[in-house]
Image: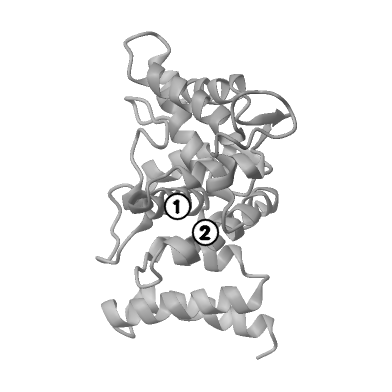
Amino acid sequence: MKHRAKLMQDKEFTGASLYKYSTHGTWEISIEEIKHRAEGDSDQRLAAESALILHNIFAFLHHDNISGEIFEKAAVNFMEMKGKRTNDLPQSISWLDSKTLFLNEDGNWDAFQFQAGIRVLMSFSLIRKHEMLYSVHPLIQAWSRDRIPVTNVSDHCQRSRSILACSLKLNEKDNYQFWNLVAPHIKRNGEHASQWISNKQYYDDENERFALEQYDEFKTGQILHVKVMEARKGQLGPLHPSTLHAMAKLALAYKAQNK
């Protein structure tokens, strides 16, 4: 694990076959071709741009069961949340924009553009599809992260994290199928975030949604509920409705543990 990146891109390490490129070298050829298309003026440009966006986001999710529904819900929720009052608390949604969420000029999710990016990644065998879900080989994910400049890794990780948070709607907790679909991605992204993202940065919308999503994981959910309550108490005061709302969520978390 310590020398993975160096070994996999070593030109001398070509595996058991006589193929002249290393494993990472083969994938690098693919990604450079996609970049070349994205920089051109052909009809392939937009599809290639979408593929590069997805490639960087997928790198910080769980390798399996990646659903387009995550991106669609994030896009719809983004437009609903945009412009709403935030009580001057930092918002994870600030990391997102129309291009990242595949929004068209009318502010609607562009499924065609999303699928165009997916098709490009599939054509280079960088992802696979099973029914309506996508998967990435863990080695490809590791390579994707390895090739991102160290100064940019935290940004890409946070952007993936923001999409996951934005895909969750607070009043839709009864949509268990979708919440269960997102849960492994939040957990895996959290593992990357602990390595690359400073825990000093607080995002109110992200913590509130992840606390609710991890309600059944008492300890994790409880920590996030406390974090939200304390942040709002410090910024808004102990009697502000948003602070009291966070306190009520924490009380329910304690009650679930018979505390």
Pointer 1: residues within 10 angstroms few (<14), some, or many (20+)? many
* N-terminal label among 2 and 1: 1
Question: In the image, is residue 170 above or below residue 122?
Answer: below
Q: Is residue 116 left or right of residue 188?
A: left
- Where residue 124 appears, as percent x and y from the top left, is 59, 22
Q: Look at the numbered disc 1 and give the secondary structure of its residue.
A: helix
Q: Nearer the viewer, residue 20 or 256?
A: 20
Q: Nearer the viewer, residue 236 or 16?
A: 16
Amino acid type for the residue under numbered disc 1: Cys
Asked which quadrant contains residue 53, the reply is top left
Amino acid type for the residue under numbered disc 2: His
Screen quadrant of the N terminus: bottom right
What residue did someone put label 1 on? 157
- Where residue 112 appears, as percent x and y from the top left, is 50, 20
Q: Residue at x 59, y 50 (%)?
A: 4
Q: Nearer the viewer, residue 258 or 206?
A: 206
Inspect this view and state whether residue 109 appears.
Answer: no
Q: Residue at x 37, y 8 (%)?
A: 42
Disc 2, disc 1: CB below 8 Å?
yes
Question: In the image, is residue 109 above or below residue 83?
Answer: above
Q: Is residue 11 left or right of residue 217?
A: left
What residue did someone put label 2 on? 192
